[in-house]
Image (spheres, rainbow, N blue to C red):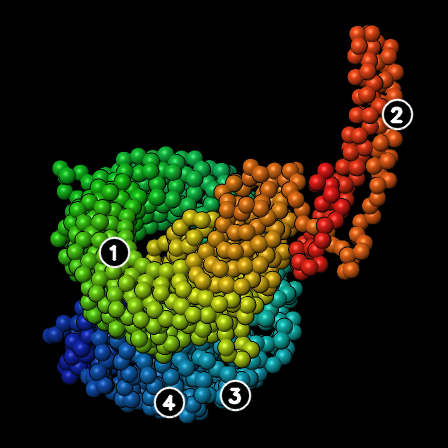
Amino acid sequence: MASYLFLCLFLFFPHLYASSSSSGSHSCFHHEAASLIQFKNSFSITQTRDAALYCDHFAGLKSFPKTNSWKEGTDCCSWDGVTCDQLNAHVIALDLSCSWLYGNFPSNTTLFLLPHLQKLNLAYNDFNDSKIPSEFGQFTSLFYLNLSSTGFVGEVPSQVSHLSKLVSLDLSWNIPQRIDKHAVEGIVHNLTEVRHLFLDGINISSTNPLVFMNLSSSLRSLSLALCHLQGKFPKNIFDLPNLNFLNLGRNKNLNLDLLKFNRSSNLEHLDLSWMSFSTGLIDSVDNLQALKYLDLSNTFFQVFSVSITNLSSLEYLIIREASLFTGLPDLTGNLVSLKFLDLSYSSLSGLIPRSLGNLLQLTYLDLSINQLSGQIPRSLGNLLQLGIAENSLEGSIPDEVTAFPNLISLDLSDNLLNGSLPSWLYTAPSLKHISLSQNQFSGHIKEFQSKSLQSIRLENNKLQGPLPSSIFQLLNLTWLILSSNNLNGFLEFSMFSNLANLEHLDLSYNSLSLTSNTTSSVNHILPNLTDLLLSSCNLSEFPRFLKGHKSLVNLDLSYNRIEGKIPQWMQEVGNDSLWYLNLSHNSLTEIEHFPWKNIAFLDLSSNLIRGNLPIPASTIRIFLISNNSFNGEVSFLICNASSLRILDFSHNNLSGTIPQCFGNLSDNVEFLNLKKNKFYGTIPPTFAQGCQLSNFNLNGNLLEGPLTPSILNCKGLEVLDLGNNKINDTFPHWLGSLPQLQVLVLKSNHMRGSLCVNSSKSSPFFSKIQIFDLSSNYFSGPLPVRYINSFKAIINQEKIGSTISYMGVGVYVPVGSGFYTYSIGIVMKGQEIELVKIFTMWMIIDLSNNQFEGEIPEVIGKLNLLKGLNLSHNNLNGGIPTSIGNLTSLEWLDLSSNRLSGTIPNRLADLPFLSSLNVSENQLHGQIPQGKQFNTFGNDSYEGNKGLCGFPVSKGCNIIEPPPPNVLEKDGSKSNVAFGWKVVLIGYGYGVVFGMSVGYVVFQTDRFAYGEGLHWYLSAFIIVPIPLSFIAFRTICNGLIEGAIGVSADIQRRPKHEVSAGPCTICNLL
């Protein structure tokens, strides 16, 4: 990437490479030297990050304070950046680019007292949002003006268009800056000599792009990137004979009609990224035989055109975010000059072709963030920079010593790579940057032999063992990130004393133990450190080497064993620079105040801190103090934090009323959690019109009074938890109109009334609701059928549309994911559970412990994504709807303590995920469904239902109790079941035959001789036939009983006068 940006700067700003000074034979004029000294004194010298980034790293120019050489009494023609006319010693050129100048640019600056200036370059300084003075128009001799990246804002003065001698004008990358359309027209018409025009990043949306068709035919460079141009761009620009640089990129609303590129074109640099044009335009791109740079990123370019592979002079090809949705194309063709190839973010799939190894000039390859799979080819040996991050590559990295002999930068992070780290990684002489994070590498980190390494990123792997001692001798190392591995061993901070250039150190989440050697001075190690992340490193005290550290920006010491009060010296660390501080999950007990002036992220959660709550600086954005023992009232000064986005005071002992200004904070705050404190009074009555709240949690306080309808201003509200308070109100039906509401918890309050909707509006209520908890209130009336019908998210008619697993809010933080999950307390399977994360697929309805009455509506069976349903402890009657059998995602069902009757529907046994069932304390009867999930439920699921039988209750269903009588015909003259005494005679006949047979046997025995013959005779012929006829009759009756059971429910519904004794009544008498 660095070489690409270097090329851009070279092409965009060739003037930066001009000689900085020259000496003439005469000394400069005194008044000109005095003007320069006064100009110098208008600014301070401050090294900005932009100067270091663009000048030092990308452009290859050394940024330094050139004006430091400007001394009174010396010849100004010898000063850095000053060029004088060799004949008359007038100052004619001033190059102060990359000179660390900082401050407001005065409109009456003495710079304007140099009338002979022909060349002025102030690029890459910081003029602190000043406006460009109109006095620039006084430089009538100026032919070169560069004010790029100088921090100028506002309107570009029209006087710039009066500089008619200008050959090169660069006003780019001063955002936000605008040029009036008349000024643009003036530049086009008046600057007839202009050859290089750079206006990138300036808003010229009011200008018709067709105005550029009048540019001079001598134009060589035109750069209008990110200018908010709209409409059609003139095609004749491509016919300008001398044009070799054209950048129209990042103008989303700029169109280009179909054209055919001319073979005579001298165009070398073409950027059409983010534009709209016909794909047919690309088919003629091979006519641009001089083209060296082509950027087609984020266009409608979906098929890789063969014509691109015919560009034999092409050196830089960039097609990022192009949605190719294909395999990587064969790029061998005639791309013999290709050095730089970027196809990242382009939905490429399949394997990486070995043919890439045939591009012998290729030194930079970026295929990151695609869907590529397979292994890394062994044929990419000439590369200097290789990036294939965030794909699905597998296997190990080629381990041949000669695999990547010239590699400078390697990024294979976020893949599925495994095995040990390749041996050449430790010996490659040019390697500076290693990023192999988020893979599955294992084994030990071996000793590094190369001393050129500047950054090592191996986090989130399975590496183990101690840190190699050679790491502490890598003197050029600036980044060392080894977090989330299995590394172990003891480290002393003094071991890092040689790493004077180290800026970012992250050893978190290993099995390392870090200590300070109290016998040695470590106060001066790591002087350039800006980021120190030592979470879960077994620290028992604050690192002492931080004492007096002034430049620390990010500090994470969470999940350690640090105890007691935060020492005073620690509160002075990074007093002006500290932006991120995480001390959560320790055993801290006290902090007096938050002294950090620019703190944006502060996490002290899960400690033992007592006392009043200090308020951080107004720069705070994320403030987390949950799970401590803070007490007292919250100061209204917290409302001065106008940038606050996440505020979590939950699980403390804070009391008093909630500051009323919290309602005004809602136009910035997205996450407000005051759960489990002792706040009393009312909820803030006013929420700002532009309310940004997505999570509002006041659960577990002592709040009273009605809800405020102004919460409807919070259109993005996703979670509203007001449970466990003393809110006395009727149900706020108007909450149903919140379009994004997914979780509503009003449980354990004093709310009352019916949930029936009187409104005739047809708009759906709570269409995105997923968790609806109104338990433990005084709601009455029937269950809310209209609401149930509107729960589209649970009915699976409202697509959730998010790939995020948990509900939460994302914000930028320099450490970690920056995603803060919502939490909620629910009753799950009869147990009170705190969900520290709310899974996006949780669908729960809890209306228990109220006074609802009537039947459970059949419509409940439409909620097919429902996981938990609790209607217990109400006054519901009727049967359990069979439609509950449609709830195939249901995991727990609690209908206990109602007045439900009838049987348990057998369909409930088919619910595949049902793991908890409670229908106790009702009036259910009949056999409990058997098999599947029902075999896992215990007796307590059915207690208090005397009519239930079968497993697991002790009452068996094989004991037949008096069934309900059968139904007679209306006049009662005939039974519905045929019956007669013939059956008795049949039984008796069988008995006679059986008796005679037994008698015959008896006569043949000795029993007859002993006087017992008469007894057996009577038994055989008289007594035996009677019970056999009874058995036959009883068997037939039993068959009739089983037939009658099928209509028992109908019998129960008949009036009493229609029910009479049937044959089974006689059976039972027998």
The residue identified by callout 1 is: 652
The earlier-in-sequence mark between 1 and 4 is 4
The quarter in which the C terminus is drawn is: top right
Number of numbered labels in the structure image: 4
Which of discs 3 and 1 lies nearer the camera? The answer is 1
Label 1: state its secondary structure: loop
Residue type at numbered disc 3: Leu
Which of discs 3 and 2 lies nearer the camera? The answer is 2
Callouts 3 and 1 close, C-beta under 8 Å: no
Callouts 3 and 4 close, C-beta under 8 Å: no
How far across and down, in percent of the image, does residue 443 sit?
43, 35
The earlier-in-sequence mark between 1 and 2 is 1
Q: Residue at x 86, y 12 (%)?
A: 1003
Residue 366 vertical position relative to residue 914 in the rendered view, above or below: below
Residue type at numbered disc 2: Val
How far across and down, in percent of the image, does residue 181 sit?
43, 90
- Mark 4 burial class by Cα count in 10 Å: few <14, some 14-19, many 20+: many
Callouts 3 and 2 close, C-beta under 8 Å: no
- For residue 161, the mark is 4
Q: Residue at x 54, y 66 (%)?
A: 788
The residue identified by callout 2 is: 993
The earlier-in-sequence mark between 3 and 1 is 3
Residue type at numbered disc 4: Ser
Nearest to the observer: residue 229 or residue 308: 229
- Mark 1 burial class by Cα count in 10 Å: few <14, some 14-19, many 20+: many
- Mark 3 burial class by Cα count in 10 Å: few <14, some 14-19, many 20+: some
Which of discs 1 and 4 lies nearer the camera? The answer is 1
Q: Quadrant of residue 797?
A: bottom right
Q: Residue at x 86, y 35 (%)?
A: 985
Q: Residue at x 24, y 49 (%)?
A: 607
Label 4: state its secondary structure: helix
The earlier-in-sequence mark between 4 and 2 is 4
